[in-house]
Amino acid sequence: MRPVRSPYWDFGSVSTRVKVLAQCSQRTESARFAGYSDCGRGWLEGFPEALETAFPNTTVQTCIVHLIRHSLSSASSQERKALAAALKPIYRAESADRAATLLDEFERSELGQRYPDVVRSWRQKWTFVIPFLRFPP
């Protein structure tokens, strides 16, 4: 049996953990009072902002592998390979501007029209995708 783990990462000091958890719980409570039923998901969505508040010099980025896997999960098994190939130039672009242009092109493509949820997902997470592009391949 696996031990139960706390829903936070260890950032070193107890005071830092308290700050991060307080920020996340405040966002979760706000989501609950605003009528969102999935408060657990709201906690995770508020986590990057809590990290940036606790650690102002931190670069927060989305795990590109998880974003791609999420994108492919909405595609049929016959189209996953084509969808993966269409997304590859976006996350391998040499700059954020070029990646944004490629995402626009993907949105207008046949696959982009067939899978608007993929485009919507990338756009919602875009702020946390583009830091990935700052690092060399």
Image (tube, rainbow, N blue to C red):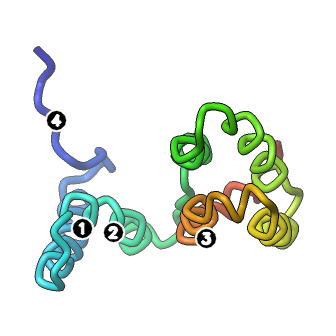
- Left or right: 81, with 58 as reference point: right
The amino acid beneath tag 1 is Cys
* Residue 42 found in image quarter: bottom left
Q: CA distance from mark 3 to mark 2?
A: 17 Å
Q: Residue furthest top?
A: 1
Q: Kindly identify which residue carries mark 2.
A: 46
Is the C-beta separation of discs 2 and 1 under 8 Å?
Answer: yes
Badge nearest the viewer, 4 or 2: 2
Residue 86 vs 37, above or below: the answer is above
Query: Residue 3: x percent and y percent?
Result: 12, 24
Q: Residue furthest bottom?
A: 34
Q: Circle 4 — which element?
A: loop
Which of marks 2 and 4 precedes in the sequence? 4
Residue 68 badge: none
The residue sitting at 33% across, 69% down in the picture is 46
Q: Circle 3 — which element?
A: helix
Pointer 2 local density, CA inside 10 Å: few below 14, some 14–19, many at least 20: some
Is the C-beta separation of discs 3 and 2 under 8 Å?
Answer: no
Q: CA distance from mark 2 to mark 1?
A: 6 Å
